[in-house]
Each structure stands twice: as structure tokens, then as C-alpha cells.
Image (cartoon, rainbow, N blue to C red):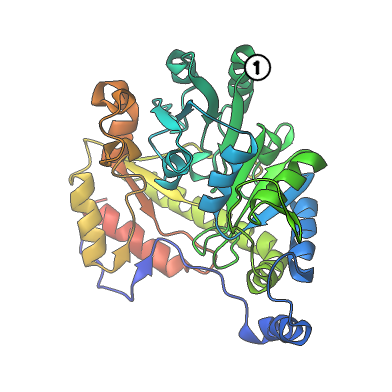
Amino acid sequence: MTTPQKTSPIYVTQPLLPPLEEFIPYLQSIWDSKWLTNNGPFHQQLEQALCDYLGVRHVALFTSGTVALITATQVLRITGEVITTPYSFVATAHSLLWNGIKPVFADIDPITLNIDPDKIEAAITPQTTAIMPVHCYGHPCDVDRIEKIADNYGLKVIYDAAHAFGVQDHRGSILNHGDLSVLSFHATKVFNTFEGGAIICHDAKTKQRIDHLKNFGFVDEVTVVAPGINGKMSEVNAAFGLLQLKGIDEALQNRRAVDARYRTGLARIRGIRCLPDAGEKMANYAYFPILIQPDYPLSRDALYQHLQDNGIYARRYFHPLISDFPMYRGMSSAAHSNLPVARKAASEVICLPIYPTISNEQIDCILDIIAGETGA
């Protein structure tokens, strides 16, 4: 089969931008009020709108998901060791190091690529104070098993839910699990505010502590109660989020259709494995990872380069593993023998482009390039 001709570049994701004329009234309102940041009216509106849409009690907006993760560990006064996954974006573990906490890496489940609860339990020591699982690619972790382990050992749970906007399970929003959940609203995410993030919590007292910590620890003009950080979301970012929220259902529907077209096209290609479809409610189709198997004609890296050469800028999420970076690889839990499943996944994965405005023609071009190596 002949490889298709190069097309205009196709990236793994593209932010969904509303028409500029729809954003201008929000900007005019900000200019007129001269309230640019620090819990302004759009900030307050977005927090409430997200509570309503996501089905959660309290949302605290942040300047980024990373700052939200750093703050979340401070909110719960986490110390010692925290068990987490090596198969994630590096900010997951960085948030622990920033707080002087030791990450302990546990291996992942070979089907979901989420942290394996059995490996969590095996990694617990007297110094363990919390678990930080990741809903990888937006697919829910085994939250019931993790909750049981945390209860049995008296551990806190902070979910890195950066990928999991709008995801639900049998009990409602996936964000209602654990002590806290953290979202990212970076431009590449399903829902974005250019840059941004949020902590989801369950009670007003915790929300108040979060709000103090993200504003330098200030309670009022002259009272500081904690060594907080500047994590406040600006009014411009919040306004953009309000506008994005208007189109989120359509965006998720479009992502679902892209996912389905990929699955149909890849089913005929030998040597390509897709992750199981978690289902309409339990997935937001934030990413489309494929795993390159030994019976595919090219190695993972060779296919990755072949896609790049044809203007398809897929990504190897997540390669390398977090545990392979210099600040982590000396830890005993980072040993290759401790993480065989994560290491295998990191050597096989490619995330294909998926976003609401990708066309069927672009998807078919990607499928043809992948299939072209097999003669399918």
C-alpha cells in the first residue's frame, strides 16, 4: 500500500478556541471593572459553574494543575512517603519533591495502565502517609480498591485527575473520590483556561484552607496563617473557562466520534493494541493511546518517526517513565525490576492526535500511514 502524501501538520492535540468575537465582551467587562485577579466575579462564576457541571461540592481554581498538586499536599499536611505511579507526566512526582516528600513508585495494571492496587499495598511502609494515583488518559483508577487500602492503613488519597475532566463512575463524578482531586486546565486538556487547574474538595472548611494557601496564606489584609503560594487564577483565564464550558458537551461528543473512528480503523491492523473503551460516562476521550506489539512491522520508535516524517506529530505519552529522570532514578522504587509493566507500556505507547476539530480525512490519513506498513 502506498503511503499517503504529506498533509498539513497534525498535532496530538489542539486547543478548542471559541470565536474571538465571543470573548471580547468578557474582556471588556474585565477592563471596565478593573478587577483583574484575586477572586474576581468571573473567578467566582467559574468555580460555581464547574461545581454544577461536574457534580462536586467545592472547586478551588488555580493558576496551573501543578501548583494545585503542590498545594493539595500542603492542605492535607502530607509528609514522609507517598506512593504514586511512574507512568504519568512528571509534574505528578515533582509536586511531592517540592514539598520535601519522597515519591515511592508502584507498578501499573497492564490493561488500564493505572496504578495497580496490589502494588500499592506491597509498597506501604511505616513512613507512608498518602497515595497519589493518576486517572491515566482520563480512565478511572480502581477507586474502590484504593479507598479500601487507604482506610485499612490510615492513608490520605490525592488523585491526580489532570486528564479526568467530566469523567464519572458508578457513584457519580470520579472527582468525588479520595480526600482531594486535582484537575489541569492547560491548553492541551479537554477543558482549558489557557493555563489553569483546580482542587476538588468535599467540605467548606477544606475549601477555606485551600483558598488561604493559594493566596500566600492571607486570611485578611493583615493576617497570614500559613506559608502559602501565589496560585490564584486571573479573571482573563476564568472568563475563557466560562466560554469554554458552553461548548464542552459538543467537544466531548466530537472526541467520542474520533475515538470510535480510530478503533474501527485500527481493528484491521495487525500489531496495534488499543486500551479498552471505558464507556461514554467513564471516559472523556482525552487521549488515544495505542500500544505497538511485536508483530507490527516497525518498532514503536520507528513508527513514531514515520508519523513525524509524514506531518503527524503524535507523542509517546509516557516515555520516559518519571522514575527514569535523574532526580528519581536513584530511588529503590525506581528500579527496573520493580516496574516491569510500566516499563513495557512506556516502550510501546504512542498517543495519536485527538481533538474536537480533527477531520475524518485527517484521521483516515493517520490510519492509512499506520496500515501502510502492514499491507492492510
Amino acid type at circle 1 is Asp
Q: Kindly identify which residue carries mark 1.
A: 151
The foreground one among 255 and 212 is 212
* Residue 49 image offset from top left, x and y in percent: 78, 59
- The N terminus - image quarter: bottom left
Q: Quadrant of residue 230?
A: bottom right
Residue at 49%, 13% (x, y): give it. 126
Residue at 66%, 43% (x, y): give it. 281
Residue 55 seen in the current view: no
The foreground one among 340 and 5 is 340
Residue 9 to residue 33: above or below? above
* Residue 68 image offset from top left, x and y in percent: 58, 49
* Residue 90 image offset from top left, x and y in percent: 39, 45
Residue 228 to residue 34: above or below? above
Q: Is residue 275 toward the left or the right of residue 18 in the image?
A: left
Judge the density around disc 1: few (<14), some (14-19), many (≥20) Cα neighbours within 10 Å.
Answer: few
The foreground one among 207 and 189 is 207
Q: Quadrant of residue 254?
A: bottom right
Direction front: furthest residue? 222
Residue at 61%, 33% (x, y): give it. 77
Residue 96 seen in the current view: yes
